[in-house]
Image (cartoon, rainbow, N blue to C red):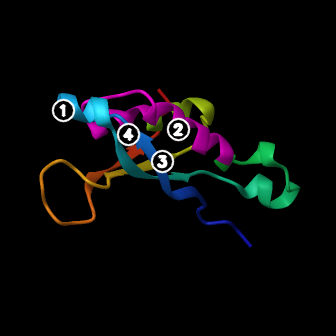
Amino acid sequence: MTLAQSHIYLHNMRLYAYHGVLPQERVVGAEYVVSIDVVCDVSKAVQTDQVDDTVNYAVLRNIAEREMAEPSSLLEHVAGRIARAVSLAYPQVEEVVVDIRKVRPPYGGEDDGAGVKLQFINSKD
């Protein structure tokens, strides 16, 4: 049997952070929901049962927490930092999808939030 594709993911991490274009957003902060999905070859880990042969999702969580703690105006910027940090920690990662949603954005609407979902391909350069 051949492994066709594999994903390691963290879905719906709830984090409090201070991102936004408006100055008040940087003071008050907001709740965010963050998901990371990476495509990488885990065929070795399938055989060895060793965490060193895969992408450790605890490390992904730490990356998300660290990058979300650094304020930015745009969620696109935060998502890019998360993707870069993942590819630095795990050069074998082929693709990273980062989804960040601000639960209650300051535009007065009734919805489940607003955010970005960006897909990055690791071009290895």
Instruction: Please tell me the numbered disc located at residue 65.
Output: 2
Query: Distance from label 3 to label 4 (Cα)?
Result: 13 Å
Magenta residues span 58-81
| Nearest to the observer: residue 124 or residue 39 | 39
Q: Residues within 10 Å of mark 1 (few under 14, many from 20)?
A: few
Instruction: Please tell me the numbered disc located at residue 95.
Output: 3
**Do residues under tags 1 and 2 come within 8 Å of each other at their CB atoms?**
no
Instruction: Please tell me the numbered disc located at residue 34.
Output: none
Q: Is residue 16 visible?
A: yes
What SS does tag 3 mark? strand
Q: Which residue is mark 1?
A: 21
At which x and y percent is residue 102? 31, 50
User: Given this view, does label 3 or label 4 mark the residue nearer the observer?
Assistant: 4
Above or below 91: residue 46: below
Mark 2 or mark 3: name the one nearer the start of the chain.
2
Q: Main secondary structure of the magenta part?
A: helix
Query: Distance from label 2 to label 3 (Cα)?
Result: 20 Å
At which x and y percent is residue 35? 46, 54
Query: Distance from label 1 to label 2 (Cα)?
Result: 20 Å
